[in-house]
Amino acid sequence: MSNLVRDKWEKSMSYEEYISLLERLVEEGKTTGPNQSETMAHHTKMAAQRIHKWQKIFKLNEEDAQQLDSGKKVNWLMIVEAWCGDVGQNLVPLKKIADAAGIELRLILRDENLDLIDEFLTNGGRSIPKLIAFDSETFEPLWDWGPRPQELQEWYLDKKSADDFSYEKVSEEMHLWYAKNRHKELLNEFKARLS
């Protein structure tokens, strides 16, 4: 497993490179992955808008930042796609958490790296984002997180099992949850993981 993580780390992109890719895709009306439909291009535009919003409004206070500095030699590799709404919601807070903790965060596209995502499935699915924390010297995975904060994930799984499940309705409710929660749940999860 450590060889796979090392190989993917070497092929990954920085946060800044990912943002540049995302901006270019939005300009061109495209997305990542094989499905280049108008719908997926629209999802990419929405994800980019969410990232831009969180860049402006998500802040870590000094106390939170201090609690995140674990001093461990860890890097994070995050599996993403440009069209993913949960990537749009969680990327900026995770980047700011990584920066506060002295952790290097890099990104890699799921559909170009199925061998990696298949090692980190969520309930048997290739859900993203998926963040892999690994030892920065041995590349041995330590833990993984994703695709969304645990409280929201449990809510989503409950809704998904209902007979009247509507992805559009549930997706709308999830994005409202993110807006109201303002990443408090995400931050608490990562403070617990990094302490």
Image: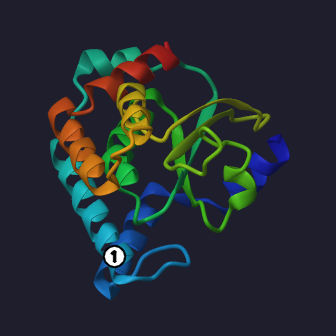
Count of labels shown? 1
Which of these two is toward me, 87 or 34? 34
Residue 55, horizontal then vertical, whole percent: 23, 49
Asked if residue 58 shows in the view, the reply is no
Q: Between residues 4 and 139, which one lies in front from this camera angle?
A: 4
Q: Is residue 49 left or right of residue 107?
A: left
Please give left or right for residue 129 compared with residue 181 in the image: right
The residue that appears at 48% across and 41% down in the rendered structure is 147
Give percent across and percent down for residue 99. 41, 37
Determine which quarter of the picture holds residue 142: top right
Residue 51 image point, x, y percent = 28, 55
Decide: is 57 above or below 195: below
Q: With 2 as the anchor, is 85 left or right in this view? A: left
Q: Quadrant of residue 154?
A: top left
Residue 103 visible in the snapshot: yes
Tell me if 11 is positioned left or right of 129 in this view: right
Rendered residue at 15%/34% (across/down): 180
Name the colouring of the figure.
rainbow
The relative height of residue 111 versus residue 66 in the rendered view (above or below) is below
- The residue closer to the viewer here, 80 or 105, is 80
Is 96 drawn above or below residue 143 in the view shown? below
Give the position of the N terminus as an image quadrant.
Answer: top right
Which residue of the protein is positioned furthest toward the bottom in this rendering?
A: 28
Kind of element beneath mark 1: helix
The residue pinned by badge 1 equals 39
* Mark 1: few/some/many CA within 10 Å (<14, 14-19, 20+): few
Instruction: Tell me which residue sits at (59%, 40%) in the image.
Output: 122
Residue 15: x percent and y percent? Answer: 44, 56
Q: Classify residue 23 by image quadrant.
A: bottom left
Q: Callout 1, which amino acid?
A: Thr
